[in-house]
Amino acid sequence: MSLTNRAVTAVAKIVLLAAVAVVVPLQTAFGHDPIDVDADVFPWSSVGKIYNSARSSCTGSVIAPDKVLTAAHCLFNRATSRFLQPDALHFLLGYKGGEYRSHARVASYVLGPNYKPDEVSKSILSDWAILMLTEPLSKSTTPFNLAESPPVAGERIMVGGFSQRYPFKMTADTECAVRGVLPTGLMVHDCAVMHGVSGAPLLMGAGQDVKVVGVHVATGGPAGSIAAFAVPVSSFAQQASSPSH
């Protein structure tokens, strides 16, 4: 589920109000396209597609055998102005061409404590959600660790997910970077992301040492420019480490 135009405009205002020194100047476009990646090979094997009863989808990532990280707005049905029930959510790993390696159901979820769907600009740092699965995933699935410190401008990251343009395969930008961090802590990045990638993890590292530094939540920017925004790991780290109920 994507943010509405009104919400994107509100997010863009955050950037315009930010101190110029904090954020690297925005580009007029991402400048490159995402590439195909193998959803059965780590780290992408721990990134999955979230389907819901509202006939829309987002991206999520495994952060514990029974926990999946995504964006809060992915769980809100704007047609009914209500949050979706947990049993309406499906998490698919290894998804490609309509088939998948594993399927998980959701027992419950926790939203960012201050998230308000109609006040995105004020509550964007709470635009995160952690899904508690009905059963732990297979031991062959490696949960991501969360980064202990926030990234800084210029650090390389990766973002992958299931966009509306390529809904039946995972694509990723493996050559992008953090552009800056706003005074609020909101991260600005230049990864090539599209609708459907909301909720995808911002990843840093290589090999088996890949950690989550944030979760992608929106795109927007001044006229003629574009940037992407992510909630930092510090916003949800405490909840992510809490025992499952």
Image (cartoon, rainbow, N blue to C red):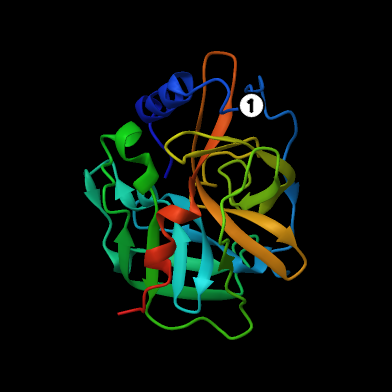
Q: Horizontal placement of 117 versus 55: left or right?
A: left
At horizontal 47% and vertical 24% (from top left) the residue drawn is: 18
Q: What's the amino acid at mark 1? A: Val
Q: Position of residue 217 (x, y in %)?
A: 47, 43
At horizontal 53% and vertical 13% (from top left) the residue drawn is: 223
Can residue 42 be seen here? The reply is no
Can residue 51 be seen here? The reply is yes
| Total marks in image | 1
Q: Horizontal placement of 123 versus 80: left or right?
A: right
Quarter location, residue 189: top right
What crowding class fits label 1: few (fewer than 14 Cα within 10 Å), some (14-19), or many (20 or more)? some
Quarter location, residue 168: bottom right
Q: Position of residue 142 (x, y in %)?
A: 62, 76
The residue labelled by disc 1 is 24
Quarter of the picture holding the C terminus: bottom left
Considering depth in this image, is 33 or 164 the residue closer to the camera? 33
Q: In the rendered image of this protein, does residue 196 appear above or below residue 180? A: below
| Numbered disc 1: secondary structure | loop
Considering depth in this image, is 5 or 79 the residue closer to the camera? 5
Considering depth in this image, is 79 or 155 the residue closer to the camera? 155
At horizontal 30% and vertical 48% (from top left) the residue drawn is: 76
Q: Position of residue 133 (x, y in %)?
A: 40, 75
Residue at the bottom extreme? Answer: 139
Considering depth in this image, is 97 or 12 the residue closer to the camera? 12
